[in-house]
Image (spheres, grey):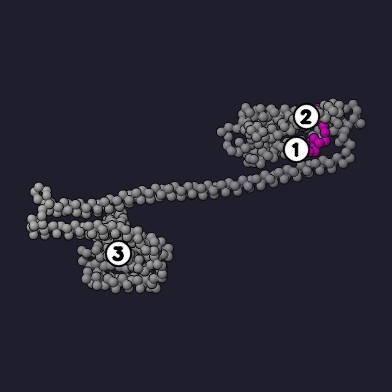
């Protein structure tokens, strides 16, 4: 049954129809199908009843059969794509079958002027008006006007065309005319009927207005949702782009890290291997046999000793390098407490005062406001500042008038920031891209983990370390908490 209902509903629907048109077609098919089934059941009941009571089939029975056929024809023409014709037939032809047709042949019932029009309105106009009220605006008013005129004037037409048989037996007479003339309160009856008609349609019109408002509100909400969806889609795309960029940078970082570690190990391992081979050759004679200690001269012994010391030194360098690598993952958990910035700067100044005098560095501090404080691990943050100052001092080795500024304030977002600025030669763009990479350094005697370690310490404080620089204009490292 469910498949039959679906197949009937989809008669005449194709992909070219928009959503509202499809709804209108589906609703028309469903109403025609319901009317078909209802008329079929009613016809069966009527025929059985009249057969049992030996009554002659009346025009009313014929009206039921005609409505059944009309519903069937509507479904057939919808099946072949004439959906508009099917819909108009549903709206206008039942009135012909129920009211106009029987009236014109003289078979008129009072119910044809009382509840039939309202039944027709309910099954044909109201549902379609509610589906697409804007598009069906003209059809809505035309249908109501048509039914209103039918309700108001058809009995007047009958009165004009026919005379009651008791007044003029030889004149054309309709049963309704005879009944109308027996109504002593006919004007009140008609006024009541018109009032009911107007009241029902006023409610229909109010529903129509509500539907307009609901549709306008729904469109507004849909537009808002569309904008939100587009914003979310853009955010999703941006997140995907950033994710891809982060993955790319992560891969690039690991590649650089592997290259640096490999380079460092190979640079130490090759000399150690070569020196170990040369030392072994010193202990061998021309045939490759190991010489006895008495056969080795004092000079060779001294060379062997010196070579072993170099091997020891380079091996220790590799050990230190591995320890430095391990230190990147062994940063202790921060012990958060309140730090007075002034006290922190005083500790740094005391620690480096002698070094500043030795190198002739003009050291300045600036704190705004003077009582600025923050919550952090004093020792870890102090270690970061020491790393930054040490790098600044190395950068200003060849500067005739070196200056170093240690500054703290709040940025536009209210976050505490500490900056270390120098007037050294600055940092090139190529170096800036790799400056926080572990083991990367432009100095041969530097492990290259200081800035990477400092960045990780800042991350443990939910902060970040930034750098800005230009060639020959110095550099500024900024700690933002």
Q: Quadrant of residue 357?
A: bottom left
User: In the structure shown, which secondary structural element does the residue marked by tag 2 occupy?
Assistant: helix
Label 3 neighbourhood size at 10 Å, few (<14), some (14-19), many (20+)?
some
In the rendered structure, find residue 44 and report the number of the disc placed on it.
Answer: 2
User: In the structure shown, which secondary structural element does the residue marked by tag 1 occupy?
Assistant: helix
Quadrant in which the C terminus is drawn: bottom left
Q: Which residues are magenta?
A: 101-120
Note whether 274 is above or below 193 in the view shown: below
Residue nearer the viewer, 373 or 409:
373
Note whether 455 is above or below 239 in the view shown: below
Residue nearer the viewer, 225 or 314:
314
The structure residue drawn at horizontal position 19% and vertical position 57%, both measured from the top left corner, is: 311
Whether residue 86 is visible to the viewer of this picture, yes or no, is yes
The structure residue drawn at horizontal position 38% and vertical position 72%, both measured from the top left corner, is: 340
Q: Earlier in the sequence, mark 1 or mark 3?
A: 1
Q: Which residue is mark 3?
A: 387
Give the image location of residue 480, x and y in percent: 38, 63
Label 1 neighbourhood size at 10 Å, few (<14), some (14-19), many (20+)?
few
Label 2 neighbourhood size at 10 Å, few (<14), some (14-19), many (20+)?
some
Q: Quadrant of residue 437?
A: bottom left
In the rendered structure, find residue 181 and report the number of the disc placed on it.
Answer: none
User: In the structure shown, which secondary structural element does the residue marked by tag 3 occupy?
Assistant: helix
Q: Nearer the viewer, mark 1 or mark 2?
A: 2
Give the image location of residue 279, x and y in percent: 14, 54
In the rendered structure, find residue 119 and report the number of the disc placed on it.
Answer: 1
């Amino acid at each position: 049954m469910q498949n039959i209902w679906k197949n009937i509903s989809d008669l005449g629907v194709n992909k070219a129809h928009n959503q509202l048109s499809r709804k209108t077609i589906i609703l028309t098919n469903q109403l025609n199908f319901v009317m078909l089934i209802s008329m079929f059941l009613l016809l069966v009941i009527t025929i059985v009843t009249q057969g049992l009571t030996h009554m002659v089939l009346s025009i009313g029975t014929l009206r039921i059969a005609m409505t059944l056929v009309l519903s069937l024809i509507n479904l057939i023409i919808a099946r072949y794509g004439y959906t508009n014709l099917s819909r108009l037939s549903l709206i206008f032809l039942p009135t012909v079958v129920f009211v106009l047709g029987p009236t014109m042949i003289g078979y008129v019932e009072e119910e044809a002027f009382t509840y039939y029009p309202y039944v027709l309105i309910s099954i044909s106009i109201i549902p379609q008006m509610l589906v697409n009220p804007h598009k069906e605006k003209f059809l809505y008013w035309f249908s109501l006007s048509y039914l209103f005129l039918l309700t108001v004037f058809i009995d007047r037409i009958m009165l004009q065309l026919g005379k009651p048989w008791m007044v003029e037996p030889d004149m054309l007479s309709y049963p309704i005319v005879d009944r109308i003339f027996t109504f002593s309160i006919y004007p009140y009856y008609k006024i009541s009927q018109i009032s009911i008609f107007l009241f029902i349609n006023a409610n229909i019109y109010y529903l129509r207005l509500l539907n307009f408002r609901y549709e306008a509100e729904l469109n507004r909400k849909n537009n808002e949702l569309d904008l939100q969806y587009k914003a979310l889609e853009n955010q999703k795309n941006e997140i995907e782009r950033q994710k891809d960029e982060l993955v790319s940078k992560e891969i690039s970082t690991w590649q650089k890290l592997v290259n640096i570690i490999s380079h460092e190990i190979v640079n130490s391992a090759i000399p150690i291997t070569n020196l170990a081979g040369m030392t072994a050759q010193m202990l061998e004679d021309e045939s490759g046999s190991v010489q006895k200690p008495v056969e080795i001269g004092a000079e060779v012994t001294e060379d062997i000793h010196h070579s072993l010391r170099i091997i020891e030194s380079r091996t220790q360098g590799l050990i230190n390098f591995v320890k430095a690598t391990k230190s990147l993952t062994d940063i202790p958990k921060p012990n958060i407490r309140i730090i007075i910035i002034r006290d922190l700067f005083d500790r740094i100044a005391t620690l480096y005062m002698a070094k500043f005098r030795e190198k002739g560095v003009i050291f300045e501090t600036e704190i705004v406001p003077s009582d600025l404080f923050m919550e952090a691990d004093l020792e870890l943050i102090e270690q970061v500042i020491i790393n930054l100052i040490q790098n600044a001092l190395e950068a200003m080795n060849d500067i005739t008038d070196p200056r170093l500024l240690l500054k703290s304030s709040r940025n536009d977002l209210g976050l505490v920031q500490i900056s270390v600025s120098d007037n050294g030669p600055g940092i090139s763009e190529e170096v800036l891209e790799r400056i926080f990479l572990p083991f990367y350094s432009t100095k041969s005697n530097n492990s290259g983990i200081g800035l990477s370690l400092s960045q990780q310490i800042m991350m443990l404080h939910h902060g970040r370390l930034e750098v800005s620089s230009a060639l020959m204009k110095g550099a500024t490292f900024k700690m933002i908490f």
